[in-house]
Image (cartoon, grey):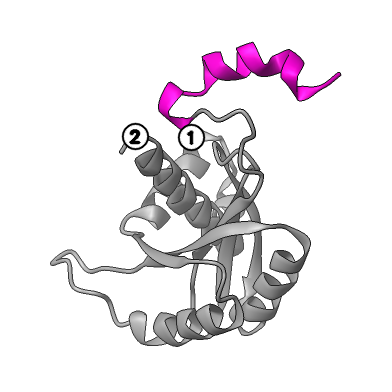
Amino acid sequence: MQFTAFYPLFCWIIPAKSRTFAPDMSRIMAIDYGRKRTGIAVSDPLQLIANGLTTVPTGQLLQFVMDYAAREPLERIVVGLPKQMNNEPSESMKYIEPFVRSLRRRLPAVPVEYVDERFTSVLAHRAMLEAGLKKKERQNKALVDEMSATIILQTYLENRRYQ
């Protein structure tokens, strides 16, 4: 069965301003950068849903992103922007900026942008609680990082969809 058989259903689900007959099949990646480990999430090919991908040691992050970009087309990469409550960038930016510069050099065709990541860890913990995860599972920092990246990406996708 071809995609055209589902086109009327596809049109009903996707808002008119977002609709095209041949949807873009590339993904968007989100990165929740940490000094020890980094959470990564990617969108589905239609860029509707954010999915947690994995958590990688930060020292291996650039190679992981390069390998992923070689396998899957990426439209863009969004990186969590850590801000303080007074809207100033946090101290973590001194670690994130060199990574982003190096990412832009290695993948010049893929735009990299920052997205405010305030409260993503709190939201991730809340989601874990609501999902009924046991205390031991909620203490898994790698899972929190992956969920934070997923929240960053889902927020980005929703903001982009409704602008």
Name the amino acid type tagged 1: Glu
- Which of the image's four quarters has the C terminus? top left
Q: How many marks?
A: 2
Residue 77 vertical position relative to residue 124 in the rendered view, above or below: below
* Quarter holding residue 68: bottom right
Disc on the earlier residue, 1 or 2? 1
Q: Which residue is mark 2?
A: 162
Tell me, yes or no, whether the highlighted magenta stretch contains residue 6.
Answer: yes
Percent position of residue 140, x then y:
59, 60
The residue that disc 1 covers is 130
Instruction: Provide residue 96's location: percent of width, then percent of height.
Output: 43, 80
What element does badge 2 sit on?
Answer: loop
What is the C-alpha distance between the residues marked 1 and 2? Answer: 27 Å
Which numbered disc, 1 or 2, marks the residue closer to the eye?
2
Query: Viewer-proximal residue, 83 or 135?
Result: 83
Image point 69% across, 79% down: which residue? 63
Determine whether the residue tagged by mark 1 lies in a helix, strand or loop.
helix
Relative to 104, is 22 on the left or the right? right
Residues shaded magenta: 1-18
Residue 41: image location, x then y, percent: 58, 55
Q: Residue at x 40, y 45 (%)?
A: 155
Q: How would you classify the magenta stretch by its main secondary structure?
A: helix
Category of crowding for the residue at label 1, using alpha-carbon neighbours closer than 10 angstroms: few (below 14), some (14–19), many (at least 20)? few
Direction front: furthest residue = 21
Amino acid type at image mark 2: Tyr
